Image (tube, helix red, strand yellow):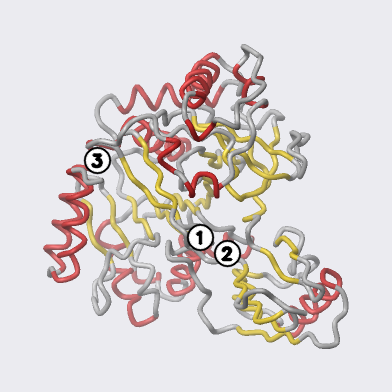
Amino acid sequence: MSHPVQALRSSLQSVYPALPPRAQDLACSAYGLVEQYRRVGLGAPRLMDEIDRATEGPMHQPLVAARLRHILRTASALPGYASHTAGVRSNDPFEMLLEWNPLEKEQLRSAPEHFLTRRPRAGDFLTTTSGTTGTPVPIWRTRSTIREIMLSLATFRRWHGIDNREWRASITGKLVVPQGAQRVWRINYPGRQVLLSQYHLQRNFIHSYLEMLSRFEPSVLDGYALALVNLAELMKDSLSCVHPSVRLIVTTAEQIERAGRRLLSEVFDARVTDQYASSEHLCLAAECEAGERHIFPNVGIIEVVDADGRPCAPGEVGSLLLTTLLNDLMPLVRYRVGDRGAIDDRPCPCGRLSPRLTVLAGRSDDVVIGPSGQRVSIFAFNLLRGVSVPVVAMQLRQHSVHDFTVLARLDSGSDTAEFERHVLRNFDALLGPDERRLVRFDYATPLERTPGGKVRNVVVEFENPVV
């Protein structure tokens, strides 16, 4: 299905790598101008004030109830939910929601057209998510959906004193700089954004990243957590020649360990915050001034359920079910995103009353295969349990049920022997003793990323494991 904006994106992508750097800046800015209008539009300050007021109130408020009622009524007429709404009797939208069956990824992946309320048209946004499986799921969203999410993110940055007109530098999985380029950033002038390459994070390119900092003086540095940590590692001995203007660092997409957060804070002398959002744009949670990750109630509802589908108690870790409150083009209801976490509804020192996402345990489709064929969730398989050595990032590669490689990035000067002793002890505790088990440690090999640029927690490199 072809639309003018998608056609513009495809056209730019086809010719972009062959353009000289200045022309690439113009291409980014031309696309950025279109996106700026589509994503922000007019009346941004007023809408941001309304979003801020929504986070200051409880979750069950008139705005949320009205939006939820509309989404449920819209979704109930779709063929994709034919088996999800049986037995819905209540008129209260929050009680109605609990009577819907969870929507699994495979159901959406197998027939995405059954979850569309109309034929997409020009102005709608298409995203394909790959996650850890690499199998794309097409997600359509309306212009108003994207606008409110973008303005919600701007509201979050405003909590930390960042004006929407200040420059920011972003580093994600987008291939904004072709291979072989020497300048590792491109410019989106209308969006006041510098797009950084994460595929050039090498010491021989550090001068280009430093040039970007000096030239644009971005107030915000945001992007994938590990890419930001890698950038900080490269810059920690090189920042004496510039005066970084970065005041806020926003990590997303990946878990960031304490050592990584500390490194970012020390290198850039900036506040480090974290945000959580699904690639389907069903929810948003971001850290306030007190360091608590608040759910934005205007964007979507986050539920936490146990293995039997029952609501978890506050603070109890379970599977996350997400329901959009914005996207009535493809209204996903109680969508099991594959993440786990916990919700805390106690008052926050910042004064906001919206619930907090206090635990984000990673992805439930990252598993380790045990010696008897058992599949152990990465949340339970915590190799860092009791490890005192600061770990910046880690990935587990499993070659067979008995053969593993631990790829680790430790804080400089850390005791690798102590780290390895703890990890080996945890292997025995979590999977049981195994005389055939071989565990290698690798501190140099790059951590594998998904096609979308994210770092996998676990990479299982064999199929149909046989003990």
Label 1 sits on a secondary structure element that is helix
In this picture, residue 359 sits left or right of residue 241: right
Q: Where is residue 102 shown, x and y percent of the image?
A: 63, 37
In this picture, residue 4 sits left or right of residue 466: left
Sequence-earlier tag: 1 or 3: 3
Q: How far apart are marks 2 and 3 (CA)?
A: 32 Å
Residue under numbered circle 1: 225
Q: Where is residue 271 shown, x and y percent of the image?
A: 51, 51
Q: Distance between the residues labelled 2 and 1?
A: 8 Å
Q: Please tell me in which quadrant of the rendered image residue 187 appears.
A: bottom left
Residue at image coords 64%, 20%: 88
Residue at image coords 60%, 31%: 84
Q: Where is residue 138 shown, x and y percent of the image?
A: 40, 48
> Vertical placement of 419 versus 348: above or below?
below
Residue 417 or 381: which is nearer the viewer? Answer: 381
In this picture, residue 81 sits left or right of residue 359: left
Residue under numbered circle 2: 260
Sequence-earlier tag: 2 or 1: 1
Label 3 sits on a secondary structure element that is helix
Q: Distance between the residues labelled 1 and 3?
A: 25 Å
Kind of residue at disc 3: Gln
Kind of residue at disc 2: Gly
Kind of residue at disc 1: Ala
Q: Where is residue 405 shown, x and y percent of the image?
A: 65, 82
In this picture, residue 453 sits left or right of residue 12: right
> Vertical placement of 135 versus 71: above or below?
below
Q: Residues within 10 Å of mark 1 (few under 14, many from 20)?
A: many
Q: Residues within 10 Å of mark 3 (few under 14, many from 20)?
A: some
Q: Please tell me in which quadrant of the rendered image residue 206 appears.
A: bottom left
Residue under numbered circle 3: 36
Residue 89 or 215: which is nearer the viewer? Answer: 89
